[in-house]
Amino acid sequence: MPSTRAMKLMESTHRLVQRLTRGKAGWNIAGMPVIELTTIGRRSGERRATMLTSPVKDGAAYVVVASRGGDDSHPAWFLNLRDDPNVEVVIEGRPSVALVARIASAEQRARLWPIITAKYSNYAGYQKKTDREIPLVLLQPGPEA
C-alpha cells in the first residue's frame, strides 16, 4: 500500500502536470476521468481537495472508489464526506459543481463492483489486499438540482 507521503507526492505531480499544461492534460488516466473532489474536513472544518478517478458513471452520478490502494484504513476524503456529504467536484477543468455524496448501498455495490473490476483490474487487486470492503461512492446532483 502506498504511504501517505507517496500518495501526496503522486497527487502533487498530477497537479503540476495540470498546471504546466494549463489544464489540457491530467483529466484522464487509464481511460478514467479524473475529478477533483473537495470535502470539508471532519475535524478541521477546512476545505480538502483530492484528485480521484471515476471508473464508471451510474446515470448522472460519478462513481469513485474509496480504495486507498488497498490500505486497511479508509481514505480521509471518504471519512470527510461520510460526515458531510455536500461536496464540490471539478470535472475536466470546468468550474466546480456542488454535488451530494452517497455511499453505494449493498445492492448498488454488488451491481457496480463487477463492472468496475472487469474494466480496471487494479481495483480487484486492492480489494484482495484488505479485509475491509472497499466502498463505492456516488457523487450526484442534490434534490434541488
Image (cartoon, rainbow, N blue to C red):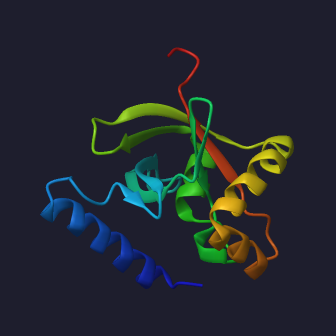
Q: Residue 72: percent from the left, percent from the top?
A: 71, 77
Which residue is at a point 73% across and 63% down the rendered structure image?
134
Compare residues 84 and 19 and report the one nearer the observer: 19
Which residue is at a point 61% across and 46% down the rendered structure image?
83
Q: Residue 137: percent from the left, percent from the top?
A: 64, 47
Image quarter of residue 62: top right
Which residue is at a point 33% across and 45% down the rendered structure image?
92
Q: Looking at the picture, does residue 117 appear above or below residue 142?
A: below
Quarter containing the N terminus: bottom right
Q: Residue 112: percent from the left, percent from the top?
A: 74, 48
Q: Looking at the picture, does residue 46 appear above or below residue 144?
A: below
Q: Is residue 6 left or right of residue 109?
A: left
Kindly give the residue lying farthest to the top in the view shown.
Answer: 144
Image quarter of residue 116: bottom right
Q: Looking at the picture, does residue 17 appear above or below residue 85?
A: below
Which residue is at a point 41% across and 48% down the rendered structure image?
38
Q: Looking at the picture, does residue 62 appear above or below residue 72?
A: above
